[in-house]
Image (cartoon, rainbow, N blue to C red):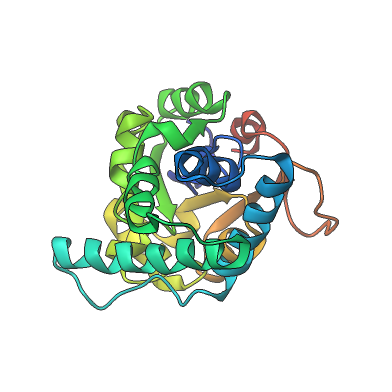
Amino acid sequence: MSDSPIKVVFFDAAGTLFHVKGSVGEVYLRHAGKYGVPQSDGMVEKVDQAFREAFLQAPPSVFAETRPEKLKQCERLWWFDIVHAVFYRVGMFDGFDDYFEEVHTAFGTADAWEVYAEVPEVLGALKARGYELGVISNFDTQFFSVFRALELDSYFDSVTVSCTAGALKPSPKIFQHALAQHVVDPGEALHIGDRQREDFEGATGAGLSSVLLDRDGTVQDDAIPCIRHLGELPGRL
């Protein structure tokens, strides 16, 4: 391990470690085909746009319920409203309830997700250098099945997800929850993620060091330390 004060490296999950295969619209339509929903490229764009709008307009996905089964019910209803809003915009169809159960289940498996190619090597290198690794993610309880299915769970010492932490990034509470699992101070941790507000500003606001993953090279602020590829991360430590 280097002379850096960093002892723990935290990662965001979706958009950082893994991503939706294709797009949300493609996954939604792949499962909607048997219900007679058109599969054209134009329809994919419409569904993707409708999803972005519905997701932004949805209430925060943090629930007062802590009992596992009740929490999962709350999450399912939250996602039902979003998916219903998507197809309300682009065209509702018969059998929607059955469709929702199918597509919601798919997002809890590896079928809908894909690990970025560089991730296993980067995580292995950091572990070999003695860093503890953790996840901090605005994800629901399906995260755990996805993480296992993608074979990422063995690399990590902790997982902090908003559904169990009771807070969403950029709230300091979720970062404090993650730090407590490693018994480290904020200055001993670094967080890497792909969202400027949730990941970079959330982490730095809680006192952690942070690097923004800017895969498309769109960030123009020189004050924000960015990398284009997770393979660059070990060199920052």
Q: Position of residue 190 (x, y in %)?
A: 52, 50
Q: Can the viewer see residue 44?
A: yes
Residue 213 appears in the figure: no
Q: Residue at x 38, y 64 (%)?
A: 80
Residue 220: image location, x then y, percent: 86, 56
**Viewer-closest of 93 and 174:** 93
- The percent position of residue 186, horizontal first and vertical second, equals 45, 61
Relative vertical location of residue 183 with respect to residue 75 in this rendering, above or below: above
Left or right of residue 77, residue 235 in this image: right
Residue in view at x 46 percent, y 37 percent: 112
Residue shown at 25% from the left, 78% from the top: 64
Residue 169 vs residue 96, the one in the foreground: 96
From the image, which quarter does the C terminus lie in? top right
Whether residue 6 sits left or right of residue 45 in the image: it is left
Q: Is residue 185 above or below residue 27?
A: below
- Residue 233 appears in which quarter of the rendering? top right
